[in-house]
Amino acid sequence: MKAKGKVAAGALTAGTIALTAAMFNHWEGRNYVAVQLPFDPPGVVTACGGITNHDWPWLKVGMKLTEDQCQKAINELIPRYAAPVMVCIPSFTSMPEHRQGAVLSFTINLGPGVTCGSIARLFNAGDTKAACAKMSEYIFANGKRLQGLANRRNDPVWGERAWCLRED
């Protein structure tokens, strides 16, 4: 995975990385102390707003991190999540930066497995509108609709769907 992450980093533009980081920070906010969030599955620990122990296996509840550590982690996370997306959506690097940012924000939130399923099939079939719309359906966690996820997907300004569908 690390080798793929290095390849991905070279293929991502500064604009894509900046937009993805901005979307991540907008929706995830910041928590500098690692916690178990009530809507996450048991055993999932979160820090820096949305980085989990799936990303950092050493992360434990109560660990304290700095703003610099969190920003560094986010910047390292983006290429790592982009790597599998570039494989499952071959046209990814030719997408506009705003669409790449939306797809990566979605992927970091839900994991590449979700993106590389029905979302990738729709993008690969050339149906961008349907792929962006499909992303907006993922608003549930542990069987419960979460308004925060609905906002993240469908907000008219910062929502992943809005950025995914932008024409300019």
Image: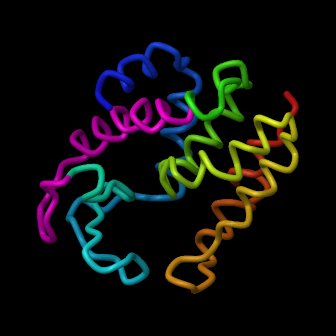
Q: Is residue 6 above or below residue 168?
A: above
In x, y percent, where is residue 51? 33, 54
Q: Residue at x 61, y 36 (%)?
A: 101
- Region in magenta: 57-85
> As drawn, is 152 to the left or to the right of 72?
right
In x, y percent, where is residue 21? 48, 39
Q: Residue at x 59, y 72 (%)?
A: 148
In x, y percent, where is residue 126? 86, 34
Q: Is residue 106 above or below residue 150?
A: above
Between residue 65 and residue 78, name the one nearer to us: 78
Residue 122 among those drawn in magenta: no
Residue 72 among those drawn in magenta: yes
**Location of residue 78 by image quarter:** top left
**Location of residue 50 by image quarter:** bottom left
> As drawn, is 29 to the left or to the right of 27?
left
Q: Main secondary structure of the magenta part?
A: helix
Q: Is residue 81 above or below residue 111?
A: above
Q: Quadrant of the C terminus?
A: top right
Between residue 116 and residue 30, name the one nearer to us: 116
Between residue 129 and residue 71, name the one nearer to us: 129
> As drawn, is 73 to the left or to the right of 140?
left
